[in-house]
Amino acid sequence: MKPRSGDWAVTIDFLQEAASLSNSSNGKNDLQTEADRSAQRCILASLSQQFPEVTIIGEEGPSFCEVPSDWVVTDSDPEVLKMACPAYLQNIDDKDVVIWVDPLDGTSEYTQGLLEHVTVLIGVAVGDRAVGGVIHQPYYNYKRQREGGEVEEMGRTLWGIVGGGVGGFVPTSAPEGCRILTTTRSHSTPVVQAALDALQPDEVIRVGGAGHKVMMLIEGKAHAYVFASKGCKKWDTCAPEAVLIATGGRLTDLHGDSYKYHKDIPHPNTGGVLATGRGQDHDWYLAKLPDAVRQALV
Ligand SMILES: Nc1ncnc2c1ncn2[C@@H]1O[C@H](COP(=O)(O)O)[C@@H](O)[C@H]1OP(=O)(O)O
Ligand SMILES: [Mg+2]
Ligand SMILES: [Mg+2]
Ligand SMILES: [Mg+2]
């Protein structure tokens, strides 16, 4: 996804032009672009070459075609390799590992030019649980640079390992004395709105992408991410959930149940998404949700 040296404007124009905007079989609001497909081929080829025994599930389905050899990434981040591996992850079998890949989260916003909403999500599950995640934000600082501002960093990568640590950002708690919610900007419904209303927010920030919204929580810009819809899938939540838990937050469905991420689990997150940042009382949010909202998510 990350274009080389300085050609941002050209690359973005190319990708948006190349976006076929083909509506997938899932409905008219579920876009897939050439960028989704290319990023997925690059990520799946890179991961499967290094971890042939691990199950890798990507949003855009299995990828069987060859990719150019320079798309295959096999190097590792030396800083992460210096970390101590948490004890519970030291003796795991590759066959118990599932990597959930969302090559481009926030496709709807991407096609509308809201590029900073886009993330690339790679989540690692062991058994049922999300244990590690990478949230890459390829267009971080893009707008500021296009407006002529000085930027130190173009694109950034945030990661977290449950019980291990986080990197690429400074975990920050949301301000006290108010309640800021974040939710969808492109998949709203009356039920989505009813859940938000019941939580009596001071502010609702509507942005694209599950990765982007969890970033708002871990950087203290919102207290909770509330999405009373069946629209998110396991690849939307695995990486964000792991990074969020690593900072002390929580992600469940709207009934308070945790999602499972083993290879045979159905992909849709049919119970909706409630994610709260560290220091938030997750159960308070659950208790405030009306029964009618919960019943819409069974
Ligand atoms: N109704 C839906 N149909 C398809 N994808 C959805 C739907 N609702 C949510 N998603 C996925 O979950 C992400 C978060 O939702 P939202 O941005 O509306 O809050 C979306 O960017 C999209 O992922 P993707 O862009 O990877 O297809
Ligand atoms: Mg999609
Ligand atoms: Mg997604
Ligand atoms: Mg996607």
Image (cartoon, rainbow, N blue to C red):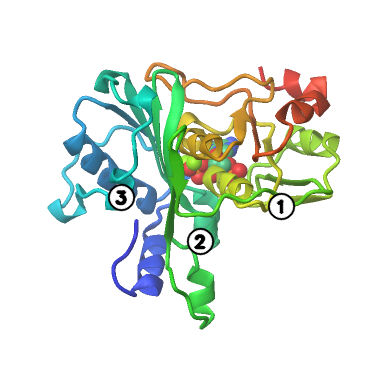
Q: Residues within 10 Å of mark 3 (few under 14, many from 20)?
A: some
Q: Quadrant of residue 258?
A: top right
- Of pointers 3 and 2, the one earlier in the residue sequence: 3
Q: Residue beneath label 2, please?
A: 115
**Residue 280's mark?**
none
Which residue is nearer to you in this view: 190 or 93? 93
- Percent x, y of residue 74: 19, 47
Q: Which mark is residue 38?
A: 3
Residue at left offset 17%, top offset 37%: 49
Q: Nearer the viewer, residue 110 or 168?
A: 168
Q: Which mark is residue 205?
A: 1
Q: What is the x, y in percent for residue 175? A: 75, 52
Decide if residue 223 is on the left or right side of residue 178. Answer: left
Q: Which residue is rendered at x = 34% and y = 42% of the image?
A: 83
Q: Is residue 227 visible?
A: yes
Q: Nearer the viewer, mark 1 or mark 2?
A: 1
Towards the viewer: 25 or 148: 148
Task: Tell me the SS state at disc 2.
Answer: helix
Q: In the rendered structure, are the residues bearing label 1 and label 2 in contact, judged by CB atoms less than 8 Å apart? A: no
Nearer to us in this view, 128 or 186 = 128
Q: Is residue 150 above or below residue 3?
A: below
Can residue 22 be seen from the camera position used here?
no
The numbered mark, 1 or 3, whose residue comes first in the sequence reads 3
Q: Relative to 40, say whether 17 is above or below.
A: below
- Mark in front: 1 vs 3: 1
Q: Is mark 1 within 8 Å of ligand 1?
A: no
Q: Amino acid at mark 3?
A: Ser
